[in-house]
Image (tube, helix red, strand yellow):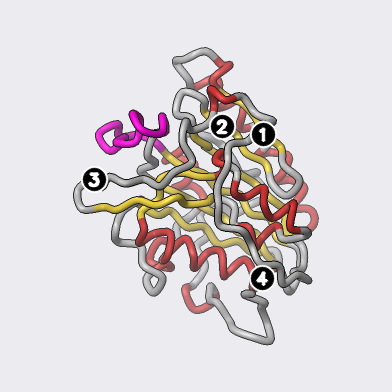
Amino acid sequence: MKKILTLCVALSFQIQAQVQSKETQPSSNIKERQYTGFRLIMDCSLRAPVLFEQVISRDNSKLHHRSSYFLDPGFDADCQQRSVGQYKESFKRIAYTRGQLVAPESIDITKNVAMEAFNITNVIPMSTTLKDGGWKFTNEFQECERDISDILVVGGAIYNNKQNDIFRLSHGVATPDYLWKVVFFSDKHAAWLFPNNNYPTYKNANNYLVPLSKIEKMTGYRVFGKQVDKDYVPSERFVTVKRKPRCNLT
């Protein structure tokens, strides 16, 4: 497990150069933001994150998290959204809300560290269904697995349709078309690729399990090393949220 963690973290750090090589805009559009509990790679032309990664250890906390969002005072303002307010418009009957790529409960070492997840750099327009559905399922899954051993979580957002960028005027931010997440746990992994719409509910989250090769094809980046089976897809019955005493969902 430690070997896979080390390999994947090292390789995912190379994605910044790969993003730059694919961009038609200047490479200065791509910037890194390192927080205490996670790392983001931002595309300033989108005012949005394209990649995140974090290593999560056993959960020994029962902290309550604040629910207000804020601009990151230590990061370039031109690379962040112009507003921290709610997304009030809808697109093709899709209602959007402020969705966090990194969940605060995954970094609740202290209250200050957990607050890092409320930086607007960690927020994208996420469909309400996805936030309360498939994405919530993946957050709870990783909370269960971290109680067994350290886990690596890598994920990101894919932007390929400008038609749904309805918050450019109000917030400056583009709207993701897909969101993906990979959880490496106990020498295994589970990868999800969700459309950012009304379909990925909590109950059908595992309908969106995919091989790593599909994520690399969709993103156009080689994120994962050769020692990881890129064609593997776990059986749904092994990717479950098991309640107490196995996992702490507080």
As drawn, which residue projects farthest toward the left? 92
Question: Which residue is under mark 4?
Answer: 145
Name the image quarter holding the C terminus: bottom right
Q: Are marks 3 and 2 in contact (CB under 8 Å)?
A: no
The answer to whether any part of residue 238 appears in the image is: yes
Q: Is 23 left or right of 4, judged from the image as shown?
A: left
Which residue lies at the image location 56% right of the left edge and 16% below the top edge? Answer: 27
Residue 189 higher or lower than 226, as above or below? below
Q: Secondary structure at mark 3?
A: strand
Q: Is 139 left or right of 1, judged from the image as shown?
A: left
User: Of circles 4 and 1, which is in front?
Assistant: 1
Q: Secondary structure at mark 1?
A: strand
Chain-order first, disc 4 or disc 3: 3
Q: Secondary structure at mark 4?
A: helix
Q: Secondary structure at mark 2?
A: strand
Q: CA distance from mark 3 to mark 1?
A: 30 Å
Q: CA distance from mark 4 to mark 1?
A: 26 Å
Chain-order first, disc 4 or disc 1: 1
Q: Position of residue 49 (x, y in %)?
A: 53, 37
- Magenta-highlighted residues: 159-173
Q: Quadrant of residue 17?
A: top right
Question: Which residue is under mark 2?
Answer: 42
Question: Which residue is under mark 1?
Answer: 33
Q: Nearer the viewer, residue 63 or 161?
A: 63
Q: Quadrant of residue 182?
A: bottom right
